[in-house]
Each structure stands twice: as C-alpha cells, then as structure tokens.
C-alpha cells in the first residue's frame, strides 16, 4: 500500500500543466460503444479510473488500445457480452455509463449496481426513469439491473435533479432512439458539453448541451471519431488552492478559465491574486487568506468536487468560515482527518463551521475519498513537520502524476510503496 509523505514550509513557484478531465473522458469512453468504427481519444489521462473503464468495455468485447502512451483507440465492432463484469462495475460508479449506449445499440444490458467513493447514496433512479420513459423494460433483483428495448423511442424527460450521470446516460441512449428526446432540468457541466461535441462528431444530432434543456434527434447509426477532452477543472482548482494557501507564484497551464469561475471568485474574495489568460491562470499569494463561505451547487455553482480542498483553505483563514454541502450527504469524511492536523471544525447538519488557524500540524492521516486525499495534501503543504497520507489509491484515481507536479513546484513530497 502506497503513501505520500510531505514535509514542506516553502512557497510554491513554477508552472503546472493540467491533464484532460477524468470526468469528461469516462463518459466519452462509454459513448464509444455506440459505434462499430475506430474511435481515437487524444491526450488521455491514464488514471486508475480510465484503466477500469477500459477493462469494463473490454469485458464486453470492445478493443481498448493505448497508442504512444497518450492516445487511445477504441473499437466496439464485436460486442459479444451485454453483461459487463460485476467486479469492475462495483469498483467505479462511472462504469454504469455503459448502460445507455449498450441498451441503445444492442437492445439489452444486464449490469450490477455501481460502486465508487463512499461520499453519498447517489441513486440511479433518474437514469432508469429516463430509460423506462423511452420504452425500455427494466427489471431489478439480486443486485443487478436488466434493461431490454427493441429500439428506444424519443420522449420528453424531466430530471428531478440535474444529475450529471443521468444526463450523460440518457443523452447517449437517445442518440440511437427513434424520434426526438428532450431532457429538461439537465446538468449544465462543461463535461456534458464535451460529451455532446464528441457524439456530434460521431454523427449524432444534439442541441442545447450546456443549458438546462437538451434536444437529441435520434439517428440510425454513429461512426467513429477523434476527440481531445477538455482540461480537468478540478485538478486545476486543486493547484489554485494549493498555491493560495502555501503562498508563492504559480501558473496553471492548459485550462479553460471560464470553467473555474466559482473557484476564482472565492479565492479573490479570500485576498488571493488570480490572473486569467486565454489558456492559463496565474495565482499569486503570500499565504495569508481571509475567511469565506461556500455552498456546493450544480454547475455553474461552486463544485462539490472542490469542497474538501476549499475547506483546507478555510482551516488556514484568519477567521470563521462556513462550508455547506448540498450535493452529497456524506462528503465531510475528511473533517476528522483535518482535525488530526489541528483543524478546528464543527459540523451542524450539512454545514461545517471552520475556525481558522495560522498553521496546521503534520500527522498520519488517511485519504477517505479522491478529493479528500487532495485536500489533505494541501493541508500538508501548510503543516509543521511531516504529514503522512495513506490510502492514496484514491488520489491516483483522479490526479495524473500528482506528486511529480507538486515536486516541480518546490514541494518536498515522497511516495513510499509498502
């Protein structure tokens, strides 16, 4: 089991290049099942989650080939198995996204209930309601879901909550449905727009992605396509917060500043200098930040995937801050780990009241989920002594060469394999 050891105290300086977004790549891999032709994905972040998604579609008969280390070729011409391997689906929630494309193209799928980080219940009922509205017959039992439809029919679907996964799954299924599908109260995240662009390149007819109403005119078949996913806004935001609280001067390259507006606004509110350029963001800070409040919301609100990292910044602010989590009910597991480092946090329902302190103390802590691991690493940058983070397989799921990028900014960080 690997762990990270951080012994810092210096400010961060230099440039960090942001990888393609994991949360964009995973649905795009699933969408490749809609075509029997070659699909080429460029600048792949070869993370653990990407490997798992590759194994999922390989278990169904698709080919999944890495070219030159950063390009991926997928060909789903010979899908022979409509029941992806149980153990793989249980590993990662995003693997459930193969349901929509497989049902639409092959008329049936049997899939286990999904797994993933234990940050909340994240029910799949919105996905299933969408498929049922489009004419699929759905049965559940013994931990599995089976869906059958000779051909899905276009329908008007209203989502009770703007779920990213449900929007993606229904949108992919609708591409091969008969007629027009309208998704209302759809998620508006940049990753939805990116998936729409990829599907349209494959020959789909999708309009309105990035708004709360998406219209999909079904087509008979899709072709192969090449695509480069958008930059990872969560990785970029993580490094922005790291530079803000550790202090220094960091340029974050290869980003879409528009995608980071909520994080940028909060950091400016905390007294940090943030300069936006066409494809980069520069963060300058003396390491002293003022308190602020956040409330996680669907895009374009403050992202739930940045809540734990921002809470670390609040722990170091000069005053009291409040973080309210409205998306996932169990996304405060990192609080006990931050308390081990000297953070002063009280939880009141879905809100955490944080009393800032000047420094944290190094300690042995555990990454309880993907973003919590990043938050603890940021805390280690501003802690006296050594910080040892275990269970970093969570970090490896979502950050490419995380410790190498921090090292290049001047962080004293070491990965130890045990």
Image (cartoon, rainbow, N blue to C red):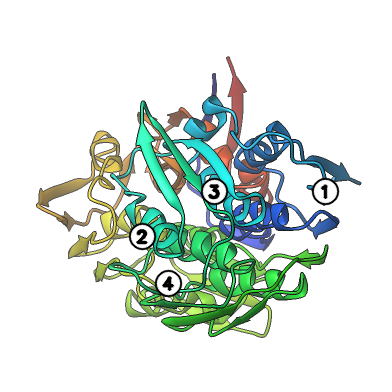
Q: In this image, 406 relative to 305: left or right?
A: right
Image quadrant assignment for residue 305: bottom left
Q: Distance between the residues labelled 4 and 1?
A: 28 Å
Label 3 CA crowd tier, 10 Å (few <14, some 14–19, many 20+): many
Q: Nearer the viewer, residue 59 or 305?
A: 59
- Where is residue 95, by image quadrant? top right
Q: Where is residue 413 in the image (x, y as percent from the top left)?
A: 58, 37
Taking the image as shown, residue 375 lies to the left or right of residue 410, namely: left
Residue 74 percent across, percent down from the top left:
81, 49
Q: Pick whichever of labels 4 and 1 is earlier in the sequence.
A: 1
Q: In this rendering, is residue 49 above or below 318?
A: above
Query: How many other residues sit within 10 Å of disc 2, few (<14), some (14-19) or many (≥20)?
Result: many
Looking at the rendered structure, the secondary structure element under dot 3 is helix
Q: Is 43 rendered above or below residue 343?
A: below
Labels 3, 2: front one: 3
| Residue 274 visible, this angle | yes
Q: Which residue is drawn at 81% across and 53% down?
A: 36
State the CA–CA distance, disc 3 to disc 2. Answer: 25 Å
User: Which disc number belongs to residue 187?
Assistant: 4
Tag 4–tag 3 contact (CB < 8 Å):
no
* Residue at which label 1 appears: 75
Which residue in the protein does label 3 denote?
99
- First-in-chain label (2 vs 1): 1
Q: Is residue 289 left or right of residue 260?
A: left
Q: Earlier in the sequence, mark 3 or mark 1?
A: 1
Q: Name the residue under label 2.
A: 304
Earlier residue among tags 4 and 3 = 3
Q: Do callouts 4 and 1 mark residues in contact (Cβ within 8 Å)?
A: no
Near mark 1 (Cα within 10 A), the count class, few <14, some 14-19 or many ≥20, is many
| Figure label count | 4
How far is mark 3 from mark 1, CA to CA?
Answer: 17 Å
């Amino acid at each position: 089991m690997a762990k990270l050891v951080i012994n810092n105290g210096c400010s961060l300086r230099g440039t960090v290049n942001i990888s393609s977004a994991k949360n964009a790549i995973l649905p795009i891999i699933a969408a490749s099942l809609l075509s029997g032709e070659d699909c080429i994905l460029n600048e792949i972040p070869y993370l653990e989650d990407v490997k798992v998604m590759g194994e999922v579609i390989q278990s169904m008969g698709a080919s999944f080939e890495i070219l030159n280390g950063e390009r991926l070729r997928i060909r789903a011409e010979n899908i022979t198995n409509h029941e992806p391997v149980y153990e793989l689906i249980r590993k990662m929630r995003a693997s459930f996204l193969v349901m929509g494309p497989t049902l639409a193209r092959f008329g049936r799928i049997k899939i286990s209930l999904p797994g993933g980080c234990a940050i909340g219940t994240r029910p799949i009922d919105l996905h299933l309601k969408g498929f049922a509205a489009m004419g699929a017959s759905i049965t559940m039992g013994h931990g599995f879901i089976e869906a059958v439809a000779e051909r899905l029919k276009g329908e008007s679907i209203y989502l009770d909550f703007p779920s990213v996964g449900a929007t993606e799954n229904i949108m992919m299924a609708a591409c091969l449905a008969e007629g027009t599908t309208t998704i209302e109260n759809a998620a508006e995240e940049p990753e939805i727009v990116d998936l729409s662009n990829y599907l349209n390149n494959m020959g789909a007819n999708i309009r309105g992605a990035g708004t709360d109403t998406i219209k999909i005119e079904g087509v008979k078949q899709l072709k192969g396509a090449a695509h480069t996913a958008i930059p990872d806004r969560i990785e970029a935001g993580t490094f922005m917060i790291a530079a803000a609280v550790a202090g220094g001067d960091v340029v974050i390259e290869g980003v879409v500043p528009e995608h980071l507006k909520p994080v940028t606004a909060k950091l400016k509110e905390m007294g940090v200098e943030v300069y936006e350029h066409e494809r980069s963001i520069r963060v300058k800070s003396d390491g002293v930040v003022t308190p602020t409040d956040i409330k996680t919301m669907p895009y374009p609100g403050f992202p739930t995937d940045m809540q734990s990292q921002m809470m670390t910044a609040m722990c170091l602010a000069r005053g009291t801050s409040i973080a309210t989590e409205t998306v996932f009910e169990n996304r405060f597991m990192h609080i006990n780990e931050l308390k081990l480092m000297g953070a002063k946090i009280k939880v009141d329902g879905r809100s955490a009241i944080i009393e800032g302190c000047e420094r944290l103390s190094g300690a042995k802590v555990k990454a309880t989920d993907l973003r919590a691991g990043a938050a603890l690493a940021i805390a280690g940058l501003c802690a006296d002594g050594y910080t040892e983070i275990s269970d970093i397989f969570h970090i490896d799921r979502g950050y490419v060469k995380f410790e190498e990028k921090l090292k290049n900014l001047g962080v004293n960080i070491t990965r130890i394999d045990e």
